[in-house]
Image (cartoon, helix red, strand yellow):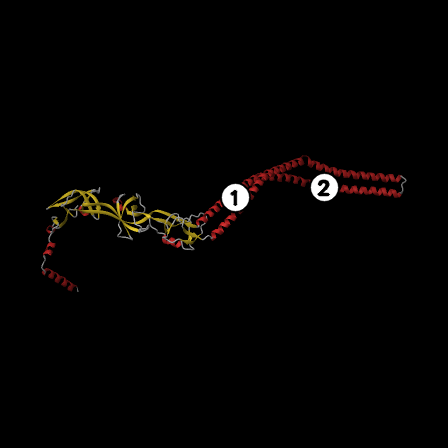
Amino acid sequence: MKRLLNTFIILGFIYCASQPVSADDAKADKPAEATSNGKSNGNGQATATFTVEKKPMKIEVQVDGVFEATETREVAVKTDEWSQLTVEWAVDHGTRVKKGDPLLRFDTREFDIALADKEADLELAKLALQNAESALELKEKSVPESLAAARRAANESAENLARFRKSARADMIRDAEESLRSAERSLSYQLEELKQLERMYKADDLTEETEEIVLVRARHRVEAFEYNLEKAKKSKERFDSLGLPRLTADIEQAATNAKLALQQAEDTMPASLVEARLGLEKLQTNFRRSKEKLSRLRRDGDELTVVAPSDGVVYYGQAVLGAWPSASGVATTLQPGALVKPKQVVMTIVKNEDLFVRSAIDEKQLHQVNRGAVTTISPTAYPKLKLKGRLDRLSSIPIAPGKFEAICDVDVPKTVQAGMACKMAILVAEKPDAIMVPATAVKVNDDGDKGYVYVVDGDDKRKQDVRIGHRHDQQLEILSGLGVGDKVLTKNTD
């Protein structure tokens, strides 16, 4: 197989060698000096040249843009307290409206219930506040009186204890002892009287019956006094062992309790008064806040029917750099039964009578564009329509990585609407007789404004300094250094 392939290759060479050579083929095989637009470089290779001439030059920066309205009014549901915004009805996207026309209406059933509950809660809070104010007023009067009573009780208990220790205890002991001695003396007197009666009756002439009556009575009195004495002894014993210690402990404990009660009253009553005042302040604050919330909720009720803030066309969503990225999402949000978030921009009222074009210029093109430049704008919807405008603003800082905002003033027909896309050509430079050369012909200096080319004159070439103007499509404008008719190397050998 390899031998067969080699055979075909050899036969091919033989066939080619046997064919006649045309004049054009011979010319193509000649060195560069034989061509009409080349010069030999001394090595038998052709070096291409071109002849300098003047021709019209028009340089434009092409960018995408979007038509945007000068006057827009965003529509958001500005509720402060009510967040359950259930759509009942919404105007269609693209509807032309007048100021005050209804745009959006929300279901109010849940709102009405919530409003009634808040009003009832506020009334209860008002009653609680009144009760707290009355309680504080009473407490401010009772606390000083209670403290004074506690001090009096403590002083009296302390005085009672001191008096008991100083004299009352001793007096009680003496009273008990005297009571016992009195019982002993009374018994002694009765015994003595009984003895005297018994001696007397032995000597008198009283009848035995009378004698018996008197003696019996005397003996009964003795028995009674004996009982009283026994009772007095037991009472004295109880007093010594139980009554006096217990009484002493009770008086001491009463003094201690009164002292502790006073200390507790002094510690807690002023604090409880401060607590009551703070509690009242808190209730007052809560009442004020509840009242403010109720007021805001009532105002929210006015927001449940949204009306147009101005004349214009309804656009769903919010404009972002002239575009409407959220329109489709908002359309879903505005379906009946859907929920809308408070403060969410759901619509924008656009006045399409006064439009401008917003676009973004690449950072690499920024040096070519100047404010005030003439622009030609072609709406995407009407490509044959050419609108003239002027670049009004150009941002000095990027609006996105590598992008700078450009705003163009333009008069537009009524068929063009905000949000439509367009192509915008920004005029950089225009001359009827500019000298343009290939960028490959120029060796540019570091400053970028100057350079040199090689001008061919017969068999010679010379280095020629040039001053550079605009750059466009691999072409450089030559401001000075070259004239019409000069032949220049297409590719600078340096």
Q: Earlier in the sequence, mark 2 or mark 1?
A: 2
Q: Amino acid at mark 1?
A: Leu
Quadrant including the N terminus: bottom left
User: Around disc 1, counting alpha carbons within 10 Å, would you say few (fewer than 14), some (14 to 19), or many (20 or more)?
Assistant: some
Disc 2 vs disc 1: which is toward the camera? 1
323 displayed left or right of 296: left
Q: Is residue 184 above or below residue 318?
A: above
Disc 2 secondary structure class: helix
Query: Residue placed farthest to the front in the image?
Result: 98
471 displayed left or right of 334: left
Disc number placed over residue 421 in the picture, else none: none
| Residue closest to the eye, 412 or 271 | 412
Give the alpha-carbon distance from disc 2 to disc 1, as whole Å.
Answer: 64 Å
Q: Residue at x 78, y 42 (%)?
A: 226
* Image quarter of residue 328: bottom left
Spot occupied by residue 258 in the image (x, y as percentages of width and height): 62, 39
Spot occupied by residue 48 in the image (x, y as percentages of width and height): 14, 49
* Image quarter of residue 177: top right
Q: Residue at x 75, y 42 (%)?
A: 231
Quadrant including the C terminus: top left
Determine which residue is flagged by label 1. 283
Determine which residue is flagged by label 2. 237
Q: Amino acid at mark 2?
A: Glu
Query: Residue placed farthest to the top in the image?
Result: 166
* Image quarter of residue 12: bottom left
Spot occupied by residue 289 in the image (x, y as percentages of width and height): 49, 44
397 displayed left or right of 487: right
Q: Is residue 91 above or below residue 444?
A: below
Q: How many marks?
A: 2
Disc 1 secondary structure class: helix
| Residue closest to the eye, 258 or 283 | 283
